[in-house]
Amino acid sequence: MPIYVLIAINTSKWFIRAIDKIRRAFTWKGRQQVNGGSCLVAWDKVQHPLDLGGLGILDLEIMSWALQVRWLWFVKTDPNRSWKGLNIHVHPNACALFAIALESQVGDGNNTLFWSDRWLMGCSVADVAPLVVANVPSKTRKQRTVAQDLHDQSWPADIQGGLSLIGLFEYF
């Protein structure tokens, strides 16, 4: 059950520390509370994998980020699921990991976001022209696909403020 909570909510540090306090006490003494003298090994070392000398107990904060990256993957790859419309807050570290790890292949362009996905030789438009992307409404950045914006060259209409965009793609 805590796994689903870690996906759905962005847990705060105090919440993770409270759970770790209980896990630490149970690991060392089998009780709900324990003092520092009973802990045989630092908790950070205990959370290392077995092959690195730890006990393999999961770091809840990192596990939460991994589950949120998985959530982002499901949203990206399976748009027909019933939970697609849920607005789950994802930690910035999980978003950054997902953005770095994913490189889109455009295909028909219906599943690739024009402004934020990495579809331009491993880069996104946000990487190449961050000042231009800053003038695109957030809702448009999150929804507009390559197919929609390249159809009849409609992507300049997304930009607010009437910027001159001649030569945006000269880098390519």
Image (tube, rainbow, N blue to C red):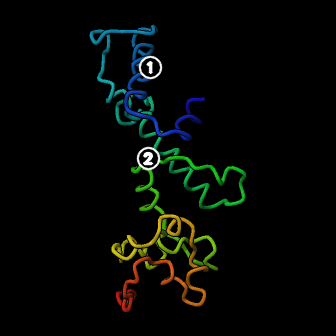
Image vertical order of residue 113 relative to residue 48, above or below: below
Residue 92 in view, yes or no:
yes
Query: Residue at 32% of width from left, 29% of height from top?
Result: 45
Position of 21 compared to 85: left or right? left
- Dots 1 and 2: beta carbons under 8 Å? no
Image position, residue 65 (x, y; %): 46, 44
Q: Quadrant of residue 133?
A: bottom left
Q: Give left or right: position of 94 versus 82.
A: left
Give me the residue at 49% from left, 75% from top: 119
Q: Nearer the viewer, residue 127 or 140?
A: 140
Identify whether 106 is placed above or below 51: below
Quarter of the image where one finds residue 20:
top left
Residue assigned mark 2: 91
The kind of residue tagged 1 is Arg
Label 2 element class: loop
Q: Amino acid at mark 2?
A: His
Q: Is residue 172 visible?
A: no
Q: Position of residue 158 (x, y in %)?
A: 50, 77
**Distance from Cα at disc 1 to Cα at disc 2:** 23 Å
Report crowding for label 2: few under 14, some 14 to 19, many 20 or more residues within 10 A (C-alpha).
some
Q: Quadrant of residue 48?
A: top left
| Residue 164 image offset from top left, x and y in percent | 37, 88
Q: Which residue is mark 1?
A: 23
Q: In percent of the image, x 39 and y 13: which residue is there?
A: 28
Which residue is found at the position 36% from the left and 91% from the top?
A: 167
Question: Split into 4 quadrants, where in the image is the C terminus?
Answer: bottom left
